[in-house]
Image: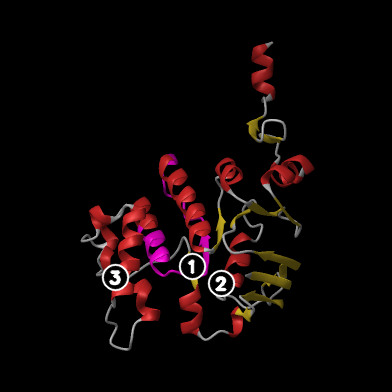
Amino acid sequence: MLALQSLAVGYRNPRGAVLSGIDLSAAPGDFICILGRNAAGKSTLMRTIAGLQTSLDGIVLLEGEDIASMRPATRARRIAVVLTERQFNPGLRVDDVIALARQPFTGWQGGLAHDDRAAIADAVAVTGVEPFLRRYFSDLSDGERQRVMIARALAQTPRLMVLDEITAFLDLPSRVEIMALLRARARQKGQVVLLSSHDLDLSLQLSDSVWLLDGAGGFSVGTPDALSRSGALGRAFDTDAIRFSPSQGRFEIRTSPVKAERDE
């Protein structure tokens, strides 16, 4: 359903390619977490996959069609994107923001048909945003805004969802709820969900597959268990302060020299 072929992403300036030689695919229903430290290239990769940034080489195919060559209206019907910096006019209410998801499917007058209203109602119900539908989007907390943007993406009924750090402003119960919801929706609707996150432990528990960026241009792909056993997670994230424990399947804080001296 989604295929990355000889893909290179980055910038046409001295910085050049951030990642290159990427050959990957994803099937309908896949819930994939993209992990890596800051500046490893997660956002650059996701923007390129979504068609928001031109690739340096290679192509991204969605159901056999080059995303970069799609007409904007076609891309808007097939791909939902939620970025951390996405903002809306402060005069829009929450229900307006979510309804905008159906704009690619409406006629030139923008009238909502039965299918549009059903998609919106479903997204509102599963994300729990109904209590603040009549509030202005700009008046919401960061966490509430993120939940609204997720509802908007679901209302778009896309084939591919590209979600960059969407749980950054949510508390732990909400992060678990939203990620579990997205995984379930991917399977129910046959969508592909690509989600980047710094919530490493939760991502490893819920993802079907992990695309792991090591920050040096390296790229590893596999199930959380496979990447854990191979040592790839440790190589990407281990520092003097933390280490990944393959036996425990989670990150652990290293004992500091100061603490060790006190314990003695």
Query: Residue 81 shows which numbered tag?
Result: 1
- How would you rate the neighbour count of disc 2 (Cα within 10 Å): few for under 14, some for 14-19, many for 20 or more? many
Q: Are marks 1 and 3 in contact (CB under 8 Å)?
A: no
* Distance between mark 1 and mark 2 Cα atoms: 7 Å
Region of the chain picked out in magenta, as a range: 148-172
Q: Which amino acid does label 1 sit on?
A: Val
Of the numbered discs 1 and 3, the one sitting upstream in the chain is 1
Q: Reading the chain from its start, which is encountered first: label 1 or label 2?
A: 2
SS at mark 2 in the image: loop
Q: Of the residues under marks 3 and 2, which one precedes in the sequence?
A: 2
Residue 50 marker = 2
Q: Please, what is the three-letter code of the amino acid marked with disc 2? A: Ala
| Image quadrant assignment for residue 123 | bottom left
- Residue 172 lies left or right of residue 121; in this view the side is right
Residue 115 place in picture, x, y as percent: 33, 73
Residue at 75 percent of width and 46 percent of height = 232
Which image quarter: residue 229?
top right
Q: Residue furthest top?
A: 264
Q: Mark 3 points at which residue?
A: 117
Direction from residue 20 to residue 112 in the image, left or right: left
* Residue 158 part of the magenta segment: yes
Quadrant holding the C terminus: top right
Closest to the observer: 239 or 106?
A: 106
Query: Which residue is found at the position 76% from the left and 57% from the top?
Result: 218
**What coloring was used for the rendering?**
secondary structure
Label 3 crowd bin: few (<14), some (14–19), many (20+), radius 10 Å: some
Distance from Cα at disc 1 to Cα at disc 3: 20 Å
Q: Where is residue 247 in the image (x, y as percent from the top left)?
A: 72, 31
Q: Mark 1: which secondary structure? A: strand
